[in-house]
């Protein structure tokens, strides 16, 4: 572990100024991923700017009937928040499907979005990895990659984004609020993470010096039902082999609003636009769900050892959509 | 034999429970002598080759770095039976992760960073790290682990198998498994006045003392090893490991105390693991399921550093009637880390294969799997012909079936559906040998009415402190709270390691012998004791050295119920029940903990624990607890451990068999058999993860 400086500002402006003044600085929130990466020699920031003292931990209703979640709100607190549980069950379920209780108590909303891939080559500084050391190569493509991407990968990188929370946020049309030296802006969660292309070192569209201040969710569509489901190697504390978040409205046997996102399949939470096209206005039947899943997963390009993810994701999507559409209640 | 069921919630509470939960218990890393330096080892980053240069100069210029030890300047070591301990003695790199240098610095952080940036040049050679059943370099060793002959033949297997009306011929495989105790391996070493003191996380301080004395060419009495509290080992601390050697080297080199803690991600390369196996089992039987021919052939791997052969075919020599039998092992030396002991080496992997094959036989002959096993109960141990000192397998199977609600089970596979879930049940037998080693102990009576038993036993979390006090109090005929136990230091009377489920039997016998003699000594006295008290010493070398005329084994039966999600391929265990026949259970509370701990580890072996050898780099991929999936609490269902009390006079004065390992044996097979019963799919490659199961489900 390299020596580093540490500051804990109390004002957001100060944190952003500090960052701008020190190339290579990193913001520290829960530290559940960044500190690991520092121990592994994968990250070596000269300065850590602890943002836990900033006033960014609130969870509050917006004037538009949505919800704003501060960047340092803890995953466990967000998952347990009454408004999240009632209006955005997919988000609560996704948060509770992630990590372990201890990690969720420390991990934050902003940090969760910015966590890095758990690709074994990325985490091992003694091996090549285009994400960690651009241009060094990607041994995962021909190596150990059962857990890695089937959608949107490139010759340079086959990593997956590990977050559960971000998958639910993508399906919920949430927006990331950023603040940097140039001011504030918002980016939809579904567009916040990048595909690897030829720059796999860049996980997101965040600009150097920008701080996530929070995430804003719009009011859920009237009558919407949502859920998150994840398949994994053990019942707790395991990353998704594949997961799905879905938000649906059904009226007179037909699907109205349809939002679907996959986790564990790509370098980003995978908003399934092609599937949504099939779903909208279609009869709420198993046949529709299968067609929708197939429409999205037709683009999959599995690697040697991860082909199982395609039928797994398909099954998850069909199952979750069926369960949601079959429900008689409209709150969960 | 009489059977009696004991409630598992009674028994003396752990003597060190409060110390452990309050943090008062001092582990190897909690010993930081004044002036202590910190060492960080440097693992090789090639899978095979030679070190051509270590560029230590740049690192030595860093503030706080005190030394860099390499094969060129490290102290020369003496003799060692275990070549994995001959560290920094030459330039050879036998596998990725082998230590090629050690950095010593003022703080752990400085040492670690310097180790990361230390530049090492290698001459790289081609490597071969993948086990294949048809590997051209497979050979038959002389012995498998435990000193068992690699090959045993009885009768004439091939014609008997060919003539059998019913034949099962199946091949099972499993990945490597890793021990991963909660406390990673660590040592604090200090040279003083030509002697060496080491605080080591080990399963046996006497053994570490002897090995270090040999390596550093000291008389054993100049070496002291303390392993007072140990956070688990599961076999990986049963032999001395690199930390005690490297810390001792570094301390001698610098003249300062040195502490070395292994990062968890390095454990897979340097503390042993359960080797992967490919096991072919063939069973020939009558239409009624009575076995006439049994063959168990094991293919496994070892490293080029030492030969370790997982003795997976050995349990087949003791389990079932089999007039014609072949049991054999073949091994190939690859450029991989050295395998070693992991909880029930041999039995855990071998009984997965054998008990899966028994389930396949039950299906083939249409006989209930419990009944099939009862039909193959032998009169004497098949391979040795010796009578069993006690054999409680049938009782365990019957009692387990009763408790589990096995009777009336529909044998048809793949027919129980509850929505998206398929469910089923499975059973498997378990066995583990009774092992005993010579041990010394002393017993002391003080004028204050208190008694002290001293023995260099190790409590790796089993409850040894507590059980030894119980054994002593019973032998002395005094209240439990008047007995103190001192253990975990090589200054105490020599004792064998906590391994092979032999600790309580071996240490307890010596303690019992010393206490019995002390009681007699005290009975012959009158008047107050002298101020120094009375001490009696005992040694069980003679008793334990005699070969028993009996075949001595613990037995057990495992029952599992699983639910398989046809949407995801996820398998979740809903019920797990074990019944054991392990002699006299000395402490129900700590025994239950041992049993369910073993069963949980077996659950991981069946379903979640997977290790991938990276063919390009030559290392195991899953090296942290986020990626190497030991079961989480949420994976462990309603879990029950019960036992039938045995009265076996042919064991030791306590009448006990070992219980630390049998819980894992058979659990994986019971779960895999339940998965078959649930789904109708027989998968023969562990672990049964969703990617493997999903393609077979609808």
Image (cartoon, coloured by chain):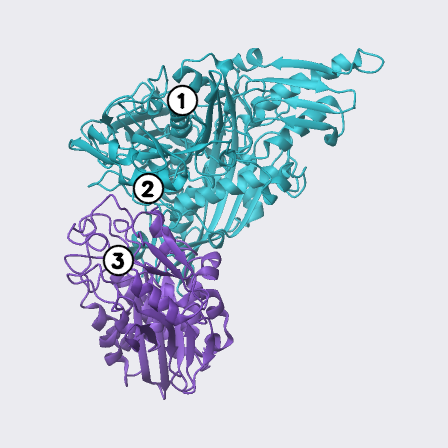
Chain colours: A purple, B cyan
Residue B608: image x %, image y %? 39, 48
The chain ID associated with circle 3 is: A
Q: Quadrant of the C terminus of chain A?
A: bottom left
Taking A47 as reference, is B542 left or right? right
Q: Residue at x 19, y 55 (%)?
A: A303
| Same subunit, tags 1 and 3 | no
Q: Position of residue B623 (x, y in %)?
A: 34, 44
In the visual, does B292 lie left or right of B665? left
Q: Nearer the viewer, residue B547 or B84?
A: B84
Q: Are marks 3 and 2 on the same chain?
A: no
Mark 3: which secondary structure?
A: loop
Task: Report the residue that reaches farthest toward the bottom.
Answer: A252
Q: How many marks?
A: 3
Mark 1 or mark 2, which is nearer the start of the sequence? 2
- Residue in the foreground of this view, choosing between B290 and A38: A38
Picture layout, residue A133 above or below residue B641: below
Q: Position of residue B647 (x, y in %)?
A: 63, 27
Q: For the residues marked 3 and 2, what is the alpha-carbon distance in whole angstroms? A: 40 Å
Along the viewing direction, whichever of A44 and A122 lies nearer the viewer: A44
Q: Report x, y in % for residue B659.
A: 54, 33
Q: Nearer the viewer, mark 1 or mark 3?
A: 1
**Spatial distance from mark 2 to mark 1, Cα to Cα?**
23 Å
Residue at the spot of label 3: A308
Q: Which residue is mark 2?
A: B113
Residue topped by disc 1: B252
Residue A140: which disc?
none
Q: Residue at x 75, y 14 (%)?
A: B520
**Residue B158 showing in the rendered view:** yes
Residue A309 lies, with reference to residue B55, above or below; the image says below
Helix, strand or loop under label 2 = helix
Single out the mark in the foreground, 3 or 2: 2
| Chain for numbered disc 2 | B
């Amino acid at each position: 572990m390299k020596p580093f400086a540490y500051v804990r500002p109390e004002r957001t402006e100060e944190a952003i100024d500090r960052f701008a003044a020190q190339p290579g600085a990193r913001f520290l929130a829960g530290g559940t991923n960044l500190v690991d990466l520092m121990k592994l020699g994968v990250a070596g920031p000269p300065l850590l700017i602890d943002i836990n003292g900033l006033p960014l931990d609130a969870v509050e209703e917006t004037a538009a009937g949505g919800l704003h979640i501060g960047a340092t709100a803890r995953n466990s607190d967000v998952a347990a928040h009454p408004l999240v549980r009632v209006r955005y069950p997919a988000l609560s379920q996704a948060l509770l499907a992630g990590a372990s209780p201890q990690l969720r108590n420390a991990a934050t909303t902003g940090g969760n979005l910015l966590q890095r891939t758990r690709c074994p080559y990325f985490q091992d500084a003694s091996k090549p990895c285009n994400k960690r050391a651009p241009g060094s190569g990607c041994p995962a493509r021909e190596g150990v990659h059962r857990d890695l991407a089937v959608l949107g990968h490139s010759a340079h990188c086959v990593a997956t984004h590990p977050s559960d929370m971000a998958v639910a946020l993508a399906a919920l049309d949430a927006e990331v609020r950023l603040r940097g030296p140039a001011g504030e802006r918002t980016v939809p969660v579904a567009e916040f993470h990048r595909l690897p292309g030829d720059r796999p070192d860049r996980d997101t569209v965040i600009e150097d010096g920008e701080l996530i201040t929070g995430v804003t969710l719009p009011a859920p569509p009237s009558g919407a039902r949502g859920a998150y489901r994840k398949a994994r190697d053990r019942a707790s504390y395991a990353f998704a082999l594949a997961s799905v978040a879905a938000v649906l409205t059904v009226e007179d046997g037909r699907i109205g609003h349809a939002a679907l996102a996959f986790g564990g399949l790509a370098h980003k939470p995978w908003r399934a636009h092609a599937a949504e096209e099939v779903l909208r206005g279609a009869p709420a039947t198993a046949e529709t769900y299968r067609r929708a899943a197939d429409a999205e997963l037709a683009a999959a390009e599995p690697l040697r050892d991860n082909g199982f993810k395609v039928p797994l994701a398909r099954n998850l999507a069909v199952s979750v959509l069926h369960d949601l559409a079959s429900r008689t209640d409209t709150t969960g | 034999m009489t059977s009696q069921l004991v409630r598992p919630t009674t028994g003396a509470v752990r003597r060190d429970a409060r110390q452990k939960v309050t943090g008062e218990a001092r582990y190897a890393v909690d010993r930081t002598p004044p002036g202590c330096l910190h060492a960080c080892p440097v693992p090789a980053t090639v899978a095979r080759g030679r070190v051509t240069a270590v560029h230590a100069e740049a690192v030595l210029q860093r503030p706080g770095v005190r030394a860099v030890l390499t094969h060129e300047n490290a102290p020369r070591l003496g003799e060692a039976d275990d070549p994995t301990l001959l560290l920094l003695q030459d330039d050879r790199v036998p596998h990725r992760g082998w230590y090629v240098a050690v950095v010593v610095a003022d703080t752990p952080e400085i040492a670690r960073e310097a180790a990361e940036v230390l530049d090492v040049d290698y001459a790289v050679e081609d490597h071969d790290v993948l086990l294949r059943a048809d590997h051209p370099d497979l050979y038959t060793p002389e012995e498998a682990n435990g000193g068992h002959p690699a090959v045993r033949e009885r009768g004439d297997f091939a014609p008997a198998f060919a003539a059998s009306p019913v034949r099962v011929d199946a091949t099972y495989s499993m990945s490597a498994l890793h021990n991963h105790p909660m406390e990673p391996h660590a040592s604090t070493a200090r040279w003083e006045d030509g002697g060496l003191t080491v605080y080591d996380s080990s399963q046996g301080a006497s053994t570490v003392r002897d090995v270090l004395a040999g390596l550093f060419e000291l008389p054993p009495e100049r070496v002291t090893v303390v392993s007072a509290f140990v956070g688990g080992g599961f076999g990986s601390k049963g032999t001395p490991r690199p930390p005690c050697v490297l810390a001792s080297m570094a301390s001698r080199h610098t003249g300062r105390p040195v502490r070395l803690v292994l990062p968890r991600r390095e454990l897979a390369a340097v503390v042993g693991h359960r080797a992967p196996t490919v096991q072919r089992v063939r069973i020939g039987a009558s239409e009624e399921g009575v076995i006439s021919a049994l063959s168990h052939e094991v293919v496994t791997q070892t490293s080029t550093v030492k030969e370790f052969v997982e003795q997976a075919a050995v349990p087949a020599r003791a389990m079932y009637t089999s007039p014609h039998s072949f049991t054999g092992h073949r091994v190939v030396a690859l450029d991989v880390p050295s395998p070693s002991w992991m909880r029930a080496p041999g039995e855990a992997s071998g009984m997965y294969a054998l008990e899966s094959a028994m389930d396949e036989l039950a299906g083939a002959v249409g006989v209930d799997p419990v009944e099939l096993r009862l039909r193959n109960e032998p009169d004497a141990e098949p391979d040795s012909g010796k009578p069993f000192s006690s054999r409680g397998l049938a009782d365990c199977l019957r009692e387990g079936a009763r408790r589990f609600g096995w009777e009336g089970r529909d044998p048809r596979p793949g027919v129980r559906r509850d929505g998206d879930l398929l469910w089923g049940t499975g059973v498997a037998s378990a066995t583990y040998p009774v092992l005993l080693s010579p041990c010394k102990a002393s017993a002391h009576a003080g004028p204050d009415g208190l008694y002290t038993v001293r023995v260099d036993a190790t409590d790796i979390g089993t409850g040894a402190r507590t059980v030894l006090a119980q054994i002593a109090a019973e032998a002395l005929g005094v209240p439990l709270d008047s007995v103190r136990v001192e253990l975990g230091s090589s200054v105490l009377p020599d004792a064998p390691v906590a391994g092979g489920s032999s600790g309580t039997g071996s240490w307890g016998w010596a303690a019992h012998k010393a206490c019995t003699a002390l009681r007699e000594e005290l009975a012959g006295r009158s008047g107050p004791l002298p101020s120094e008290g009375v001490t009696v010493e005992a040694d069980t070398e003679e008793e334990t050295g005699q070969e028993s005329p009996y075949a001595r084994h613990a037995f057990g039966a495992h029952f599992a119920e699983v639910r398989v999600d046809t949407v995801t391929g996820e398998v979740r265990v809903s019920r797990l029940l074990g019944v054991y026949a392990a002699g006299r259970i000395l402490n129900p509370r700590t025994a239950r903990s041992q049993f369910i701990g073993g069963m949980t580890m077996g659950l991981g072996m069946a379903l979640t624990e997977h290790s991938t050898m990276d063919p390009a780099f030559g290392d195991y991929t899953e090296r942290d607890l986020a990626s190497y999936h030991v079961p989480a609490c949420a994976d462990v269902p309603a879990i029950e451990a019960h036992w039938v009390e045995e009265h076996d006079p042919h064991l030791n004065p306590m009448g006990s068999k070992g219980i630390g390992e049998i819980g894992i044996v058979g659990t994986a097979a019971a779960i895999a058999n339940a998965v078959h019963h649930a789904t109708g799919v027989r998968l023969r490659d562990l672990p049964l993860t969703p990617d493997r199961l999903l393609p077979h489900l609808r």
